[in-house]
Image: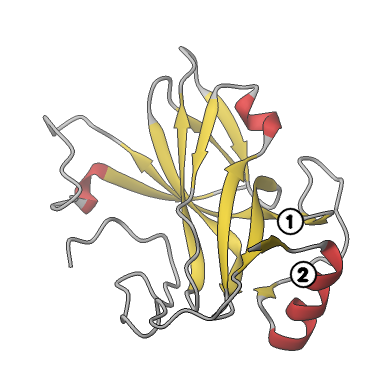
Amino acid sequence: MSVKSDRWIIDISRRNKMIAPFSSEQVREGISYGVSSYGYDISLADEFKIFEPSNIREIDPKKHNAACFRDIKADSVLIPANSYILGRSREYFRIPRDVITICTGKSTYARSGVIVNVTPFEPEWEGFATISLSNTAPVPVRIYAHEGVAQLIFLEASEVCEISYRDKKGKYQAQKKITLSKSE
């Protein structure tokens, strides 16, 4: 398994629309996004789900309640202290069958107490990524749309998988919006 370079990311994205919209260079306005040496810094869309725990006693990932979230469209939002919000990538992804990604949060947000969680993009998964942003700080932290939030690292397998995410008809395939947890 090898980590893919900027040249590979640019070539595949141009030929197969692996990432759209795509920036073939790193945009350094605000928190950077676009191609880096061995990855792609993804950016946030301006759609968020703000968690509002006022009427619940627990969170059950098998029975997630949409009523616990308030939808907002904005250029920036505050993550309440010791809470989280959901966002989505501005980019739509089409992952090749012989590739899996690992995603890590940007250091700018990590230094502000924000933990970015995105699960790996499996072979042949496609869609907008739903992103969980957790604020570990004791005060609210501001998050910015249209700027970088996390870095994807692309790993190419030594052989093609037998069953891809598309083959399994994965429950988060081709998601077009922020998607809450699904039990099936």
Q: Earlier in the sequence, mark 2 or mark 1?
A: 2
- Estimate the x, y position of residue 159 in percent, counting from the top left: 56, 78
Q: Which residue is mark 2?
A: 9
Label 1 CA crowd tier, 10 Å (few <14, some 14–19, many 20+): many
**Front in this rendered view, residue 157 or 114:** 157
Residue corresponding to mark 1? 39
Disc 2 marks a residue whose amino acid type is Ile
Residue 13: x, y in percent? 74, 77
Whether residue 135 is situated above or below residue 42 in the rendered picture: above
Q: Which percent across, then down, holds residue 63?
A: 13, 52
SS class, disc 2:
helix
Residue 167 lies, with reference to residue 158, above or below; the image says below
Q: CB atoms at circles 2 and 1 under 8 Å apart?
A: yes
**Most foreground residue, 124 or 54:** 124
Percent x, y of residue 110: 61, 28
Callout 1 secondary element: strand
Between 10 and 42, which is closer to the camera in this rendering?
A: 10
Q: CA distance from mark 2 to mark 1?
A: 8 Å
* Quadrant of the snapshot with the C terminus: bottom left
Instruction: Identify the residue shown where x is 32% and y is 75%.
Output: 170
